[in-house]
Image (cartoon, rainbow, N blue to C red):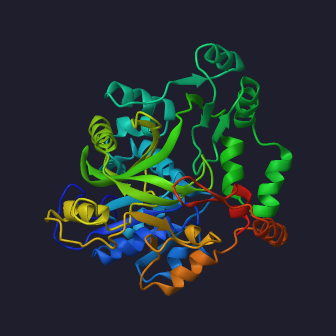
Amino acid sequence: MDAEDLGCNYESRTTAPQNVLLTATTRWPVAARMAVKFSQAGCNVSVVCPAPGHPVLKTRAARRVFSYSGYRPLDSLADAIDAAKPNFIVPCDDPGVQHLHELHAQADGQGPAGRQLASLIERSLGLPQSYRIVSARYDLLRVAQEEGIRVPPTKLINTLDDLRSWSQRQAMPWVLKADGTSAGKGVRIAQTPMEAEEKFLELTHPPGVVEIMKQLILHRDWAWVLAHTNRLKPTISVQSFIQGRPANCAAVCWEGRVLAGFAVEVVSSTGMTDPAIAVRVVDNPAMMLATQRLASRLGLSGFFGLDFMIEDGSGEAFLVEMNPRCTPLCHLQLGSGRDLVEALRAQLSDQPCRATPPVTQSDVIAYFPYARISTSGLSPSWFEDIPQNEPDLVEAILHPWSQRSVVGRLVDYTRQVMHRQRRSAGLCLRNSRGGTRFSREVLKGI
């Protein structure tokens, strides 16, 4: 790459359509939903993602799609940047954020082309001094506490002795978390000290031959194998469990200033450590103030989300985690000050935000397709977030492309039959807010 090939001066703003590059390392539909929204806002959209089978290929939103390689992720990302010449990069999952951090580190000392690439990444993510903090759960909460944000008692755990020392000061239950994980895969809730020690060993133990072979034979996931075999022992933190209800917020910011954002509380989910099925849009000044303070302190740009627990009794919001990338809320158009994509488009173009009416007047957003899994159906008052005017995308989300081998698909089919039988026997449980809480295994089988 040379400096001219990287395109325009990234510090300039223009009324011309903005070139946006979305990055995805998985086939989750977040990137497809964001691509549609950016295209509707008038941006030129490119996407780098695993192909074939990514939902974005079923939309009319992306002008160019580049193939993401699990074998050579940084090279494939750098090639996409070189070809797409974006004004802004939007990572849609955690590995994508980490890849951009690594590219930024590599760009140092690479001459004009490296400086241009580093400038683009900084424009998209914010201050490079904050890259380490947003990727480390303990460091993020430490900074949040310094900013006056409520956080649960948290400690870094390097050994079992650290965990035993913690047990002398903090009551159960606890939440153990491993850095470098997402979608609840690195989170464990322990009810007893013995269980906490078992969870700690589970999170820190490197994958064995059986697990590696499973990933290769069933999932064909070379990226997972490379990441886990090359990764050092993950950083583990332990938090006191806040008894209450989950909540989160989504925001987009520019050089430490929040451009738009909103907060929600979880109405229904598959479990305490799993993604939400439906959320209620709320006015929570404490959550939004925490969002503003962290964006300012860390000099953030782009999209991010914060996860909270609303404590029973007090109603106080405790920050428990940060997602330094797009979340499933970010494409939603919820009116003035709550349309994240439009706010970013206006900032990039140096134009005022256009008036965009909310897509719904309902305060409950049901994530598509998970909410419709409920045997009791959706509440008539809920808004189901189905992609509009994108029938092929709807079909792709309902029937995702299998990343598994023939053996893996056979296992899936057998498990689905078993789960349908269990579900018909009444495994669905009502939660206290009137939604539906599913067993994790039932949801996996559908």
Left or right: 177 in relation to 193: left
Can residue 236 be seen in this snapshot?
Answer: yes
Q: How many marks?
A: 0
Identify whether 364 is placed above or below 228.
below
Identify whether 247 is placed above or below 13.
above
In the foreground, 83 or 223: 223
- Residue located 32% across and 60% down the image: 88
Identify whether 13 is placed above or below 361.
above
- Residue located 42% across and 86% down the image: 389
Q: Position of residue 390 (x, y in %)?
A: 46, 84
Can residue 303 be seen in this snapshot?
Answer: no
Q: Position of residue 227 (x, y in %)?
A: 65, 47
Q: Position of residue 55 (x, y in %)?
A: 54, 75
In the foreground, 46 or 299: 299
Left or right: 352 in relation to 332: left
Quarter of the image for residue 236 reads: top right
Q: Quadrant of the N terminus?
A: bottom left
Q: Quadrant of the C terminus?
A: bottom right
- Residue located 27% across and 76% down the image: 42
Quarter of the image for residue 299 reads: top left
Q: Position of residue 122 (x, y in %)?
A: 32, 47
